[in-house]
């Protein structure tokens, strides 16, 4: 099991000012599985993703990634787990503007100490970027930039890919293509995918769906 989330809770503030964002959220994700987190704005979807990524701390419950409990790690350990086992794709592409496409793809793999030139080249070819490797992000369309972000995330062979509205800034046709490329490339290495999305169209492409409402699991499909 790549990801196990049990009784996850998150709140802010204390006393009368305390706000519960998540309550008793539980799910599992195995290698090669894909799961869509859906729900209305404010339901807690992105909070779940940030907690799983170790970008925020849970108020209760347990998160285990690749056999390691995140809550038991100090900040340094959490950062190391992210480098080794987790990749994150955001709606904003977050590419490094001063680096070429080729260097952006290699960036996370180099940080993790697992850069493989052949792997990076294969991803670039697979995702339709082979002719753009010497370009800088500003010369690319939104869809192309998101492809670079996907290739960068998968170049380090993560166990878990987290995607927060990864196609939210793209038109429908481009979004469909980018999502297909992401899922196909992840499937080749049996990378588990957890994706936050408002789109029922995109959620239907995933093998499972989890609907959140007011910070709780309302429905699991």
Image: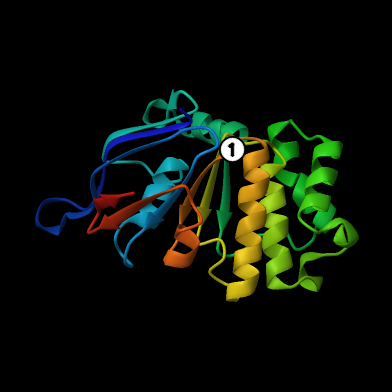
Q: Which residue lies furthest to the left in this view?
A: 16
> Would residue 73 appear left or right of 218 to someone viewing this image?
right
Position of the N terminus by quadrant: top left
Toward the viewer: 32 or 71?
32
Residue 206 in view of the camera = yes
Tag 1, which secondary structure? loop
Q: Which residue lies furthest to the top in this view?
A: 67
Q: Residue 130: x, y in percent?
A: 87, 56
Q: Which residue is drawn at 86% across and 62% down?
A: 132
Residue 170 in view of the camera = no
Toward the viewer: 135 or 177?
177
> Would residue 24 appear left or right of 199 to someone viewing this image?
left
Quarter assignment of residue 147: bottom right
Toward the viewer: 67 or 83?
67
Q: Residue 173: x, y in percent?
A: 63, 73
Whether residue 198 is situated above or below residue 187 in the rendered picture: below
Residue beneath disc 1: 191
């Amino acid at each position: 099991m790549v990801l196990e989330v049990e009784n996850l809770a998150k709140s802010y503030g204390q006393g009368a000012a305390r706000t519960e964002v998540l309550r008793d959220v539980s799910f599992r994700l195995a290698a090669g599985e894909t799961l869509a987190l859906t729900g209305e704005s404010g339901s807690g979807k992105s909070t779940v993703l940030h907690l799983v990524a170790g970008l925020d701390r849970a108020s209760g419950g347990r998160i285990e990634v690749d056999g390691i409990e995140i809550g038991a790690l100090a900040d340094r350990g959490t950062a190391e787990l992210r480098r080794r086992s987790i990749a994150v794709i955001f709606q904003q592409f977050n590419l490094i503007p001063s680096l070429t496409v080729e260097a952006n793809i290699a960036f996370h793999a180099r940080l993790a100490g697992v850069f493989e030139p052949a792997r990076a080249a294969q991803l670039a070819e697979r995702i339709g970027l082979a002719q753009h490797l010497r370009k800088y992000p500003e010369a690319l369309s939104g869809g192309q930039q998101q492809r670079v972000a996907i290739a960068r995330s998968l170049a380090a062979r993560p166990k878990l890919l987290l995607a927060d509205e990864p196609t939210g800034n793209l038109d429908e046709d481009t979004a469909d293509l980018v999502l297909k490329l992401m899922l196909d490339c992840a499937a080749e290495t049996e990378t588990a995918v957890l994706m936050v999305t408002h789109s029922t169209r995109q959620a239907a492409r995933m093998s499972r769906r989890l609907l959140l409402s007011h910070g709780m699991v309302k429905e699991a499909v």
